[in-house]
């Protein structure tokens, strides 16, 4: 088996080895009250993947116990998500509602055992009676009802004689339990609502904690795998099964860390607000983190599966950078999709010295992807280039077309600007140019040196298309809701121009628009009359998404700092710290200012420095990551210490781990308090710097790519990035980039 043995698979293997179970049976049990999102994809891959790995089976079960929020359309969306990801459930789809009669019988059995009672407290009273973390709760006076009274009331609840909320059925466990979930949890509540499958047959519906474990038992589930928020519910899970004597064989619950992604919300309630509030176009809006949204945007099942596999299965919650998901789709599409040319913002070029029409042969896979395929590009005297590829007053380092600088039309000729045509407002509307007949790509004898090649389309045969350019839906890294919506998350370009070969293809295909990104023919709105393409992802992370380095301020002006438009002077003590941080420790202005003005931060920073003399790296993690934690807590309440932060940074300084991995380790430290070295060792996060380990990988990749090696040695130095990327991918991101770069450069010489 190729998969690494995560802790869940180790549990499964031990259970099979000991004979605890003869067959592995898992289940994916979503509530059909919304469309599944990327977090569900992780659960799907775990449950179905484990069942497949151990020749078992996985049930798809709809947890349909709340008739007020559930709907058939959500059932269909969940089924579609599982199938789209490439999994099949065992036999038919299961529904908790199929077990309602049996669940009712189990509830009656608990009542007869004196282990459940009908409570008539109000919701507020139940909450008040439950107590607090430090104070025991007290049982309702209705807990003294006789078995016969409880049976009678429960039957009348089932028959619809009472209003919603008038009574509930509760387990009789322990009102002083340290686990507050065990303080007489609710088992059934009254709901006078039409159920999308059961109709109006029931007036009472089971609570999750009661229905879930019993549904698992009824289906013969061996391993009930769920996310960490249900960890405390495990005691109820066990209590119900043990109390009812359902023990041989019986399922056991195991928890894993749920998926969190920055710039994303996963709450189905918040997603529903976005859909119903018209903020997005529907559950399949390509900006949403729903499976339907990713599918419509153009993500592939393979990219989602690779992403889920890459982030692994952990025991502690952490935040994953959305860039990892974007990398997964780029990595999947790069070797698969053809490269074509699309001009998003057309600017007309008239080549005055060209006559006639010709066809230029252009490869679909021109660079480092050894894949065959080409198309014919029509070429004439009228073409369009992108407006960004011409600049009348270019900045330094601009290598495209200017009044004084020629440029190559990709696969075609070099052109030179002769005249700039403007409208009455001074906007450039057309360029008069000339081409160099002896400069055709592949047979250039012109001797003209150009530094870039730009995309273009022929004017008469280009097809007008609508292009939808998507950005992240939220502007904040940790969004709360609608208030954090990015107003520029969708830009619609109505009259982009695309080469004709693209339109001859069937929809449901993906392309790389050269220099623009990866695009997908929209499966809903695409028609022959109005082709629509969705931007899946850019070729690399946009510079606008990267944090800008703070501007340095002259050392002659440190005593006053601009804060929210107001200049506020530092205190004497703050100024001393500021001078020390900037002059002695060489911290940049913004970091020094943040530390000097916040006593909690500066005290923490100074304590960490006593353990490790790495002032810049420690300052960066303190002012960014530690500062976020201290916004809500006092230093004494943190689960990690300054000494542990220093230990984490020492691993970065020693190149045992990368800065990116350090952030992941910090997130786990902040939740568990575990030592950073132990986290790194347990998760196998140590950076690979040993040449003896890296060199065989490099040799293998070089051997697999002889054409690219030849191109590199012939002068295509850009391919260095390709080889380095392949090595880092082979090491699952653990290769030391600096070492990898040096070794690859050496081996390619």
Image: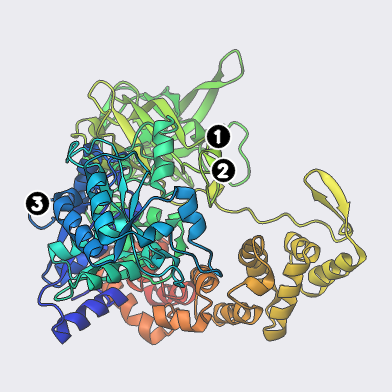
Mark 2: few/some/many CA within 10 Å (<14, 14-19, 20+): some
Quarter-wise, where is residue 637 in the image?
A: bottom right
Percent x, y for residue 508? 21, 38
Camera-side mark, 2 or 1: 2
Reply above or below: 747 against 460: below
User: Which SS class for mark 3?
Assistant: loop
Reply above or below: 11 against 304: below
Mark 1: few/some/many CA within 10 Å (<14, 14-19, 20+): some
User: Which SS class for mark 1?
Assistant: loop
Mark sitting earlier along the chain (2/3): 3
User: Which SS class for mark 2?
Assistant: loop
Figure colour scheme: rainbow
Q: Is residue 264 visible?
A: no
Kindly identify which numbered label has been placed on residue 86.
none
Percent x, y for residue 724? 40, 68
Percent x, y for residue 580? 83, 72
Camera-side mark, 2 or 3: 3
* Residue position marked by numbered label 3 in the rendering: 92
Q: Is residue 158 left or right of residue 56?
A: right
* Residue position marked by numbered label 1 in the rendering: 402
For the residues bearing labels 2 and 3, Cβ distance under 8 angstroms: no
Residue at point 46%, 41% (across, down):
471
**Disc 1 versus disc 3: distance between alpha carbons?**
65 Å
Quarter of the image for the C terminus: give it.
Answer: bottom left
For the residues bearing labels 2 and 1, Cβ distance under 8 angstroms: yes
Reply above or below: 466 against 205: above
Kindly identify which numbered label has been placed on residue 398.
2
Mark sitting earlier along the chain (1/3): 3
**Disc 2 versus disc 3: distance between alpha carbons?**
61 Å
Residue at point 57%, 78% (across, down):
648
Q: Is residue 532 visible?
A: yes
**Disc 2 versus disc 1: distance between alpha carbons?**
9 Å
């Amino acid at each position: 088996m190729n998969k690494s043995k995560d802790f869940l698979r180790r549990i499964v293997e031990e259970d099979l080895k000991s004979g605890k179970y003869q067959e592995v049976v898992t289940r994916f049990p979503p509530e059909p009250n919304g469309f599944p999102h990327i977090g569900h994809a992780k659960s799907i891959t775990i449950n179905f993947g484990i069942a497949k790995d151990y020749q078992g089976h996985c049930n798809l079960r709809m947890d349909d116990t709340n008739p007020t929020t559930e709907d058939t359309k959500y059932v269909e969306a969940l089924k579609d998500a599982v199938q789209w990801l490439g999994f099949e459930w065992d036999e038919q789809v299961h529904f908790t509602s199929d077990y309602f009669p049996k669940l009712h019988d189990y509830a009656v059995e608990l009542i007869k055992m004196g282990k459940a009672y009908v409570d008539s407290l109000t919701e507020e009273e139940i909450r008040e009676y439950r107590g607090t973390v430090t104070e025991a709760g007290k049982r309702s006076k209705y807990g003294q009802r006789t078995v016969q009274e409880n049976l009678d009331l429960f039957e009348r609840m089932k028959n619809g004689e009472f209003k919603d909320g008038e009574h509930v059925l509760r387990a009789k466990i322990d009102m002083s339990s340290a686990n507050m979930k065990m303080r007489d949890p609710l088992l059934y509540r009254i709901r006078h609502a039409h159920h999308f499958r059961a109709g109006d047959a029931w007036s009472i519906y089971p609570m999750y904690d009661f229905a879930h474990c019993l549904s698992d038992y009824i289906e013969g589930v061996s391993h009930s795998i769920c996310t960490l928020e249900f960890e405390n519910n495990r005691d109820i899970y066990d209590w119900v099964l043990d109390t009812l004597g359902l023990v041989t064989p019986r399922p056991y619950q195991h928890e894993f860390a749920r998926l969190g992604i920055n710039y994303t919300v996963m709450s189905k309630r918040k997603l529903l607000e976005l859909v119903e509030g018209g903020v997005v176009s529907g559950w399949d809006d390509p900006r949403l983190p729903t499976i339907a949204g990713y599918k419509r945007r153009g993500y592939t099942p393979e990219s989602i599966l690779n992403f889920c596999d890459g982030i692994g299965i952990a025991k502690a919650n952490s935040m994953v950078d959305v860039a990892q998901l974007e990398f997964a789709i780029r990595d999947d599409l790069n070797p698969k999709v053809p490269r074509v040319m699309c001009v998003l913002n057309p600017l007309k070029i008239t080549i005055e010295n060209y006559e006639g029409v010709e066809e230029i042969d252009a490869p679909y896979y021109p660079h480092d992807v050894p894949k065959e395929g080409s198309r014919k590009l029509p070429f004439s005297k009228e073409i369009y280039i992108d407006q960004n590829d011409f600049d009348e007053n270019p900045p330094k380092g601009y290598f495209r077309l200017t009044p004084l600088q020629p440029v190559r039309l990709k696969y075609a000729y070099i052109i030179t600007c002769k005249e700039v045509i403007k409208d009455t407002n001074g906007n450039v509307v057309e360029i008069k140019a000339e081409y160099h007949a002896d400069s055709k790509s592949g047979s250039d004898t012109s001797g003209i040196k150009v530094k870039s090649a730009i995309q273009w389309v022929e004017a008469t045969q280009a097809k007008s298309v609508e292009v939808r350019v998507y950005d992240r839906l939220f502007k904040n890294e940790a969004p709360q809701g609608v208030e954090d919506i990015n107003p520029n998350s969708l830009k619609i370009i109505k009259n982009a121009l695309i080469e004709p070969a693209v339109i001859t293809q069937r929809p449901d295909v993906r392309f790389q628009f050269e220099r623009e990104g990866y695009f997908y023919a929209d499966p809903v709105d695409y028609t022959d009359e109005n082709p629509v393409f969705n931007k899946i992802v850019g070729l690399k992370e946009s510079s606008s998404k990267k944090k800008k380095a703070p501007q340095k301020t002259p050392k002659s002006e440190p005593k006053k700092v601009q804060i929210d438009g107001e200049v506020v002077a530092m205190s004497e003590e703050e100024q001393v710290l500021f001078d020390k941080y900037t002059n002695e420790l060489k911290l940049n202005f913004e970091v020094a200012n943040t530390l000097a003005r916040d006593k909690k931060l500066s005290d923490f920073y100074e304590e960490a420095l006593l353990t490790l003399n790495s002032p810049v790296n420690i300052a960066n993690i303190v002012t960014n990551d530690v500062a976020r934690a201290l916004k809500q807590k006092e230093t004494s309440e943190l689960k990690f210490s300054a000494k542990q932060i220093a230990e984490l940074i020492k691993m970065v300084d020693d190149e045992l781990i990368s800065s990116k991995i350090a952030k992941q380790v910090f997130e786990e430290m902040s939740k568990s308090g575990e030592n950073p070295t132990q986290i790194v060792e347990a998760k196998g996060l140590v950076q690979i710097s040993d040449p003896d380990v890296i060199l065989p990988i490099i040799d293998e990749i070089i051997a697999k790519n002889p054409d690219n090696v030849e191109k590199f040695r012939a002068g295509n130095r850009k391919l260095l990035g390709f080889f380095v990327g392949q090595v880092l991918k082979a090491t699952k991101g653990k290769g030391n980039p600096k070492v990898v770069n040096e070794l690859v450069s050496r081996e390619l010489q």
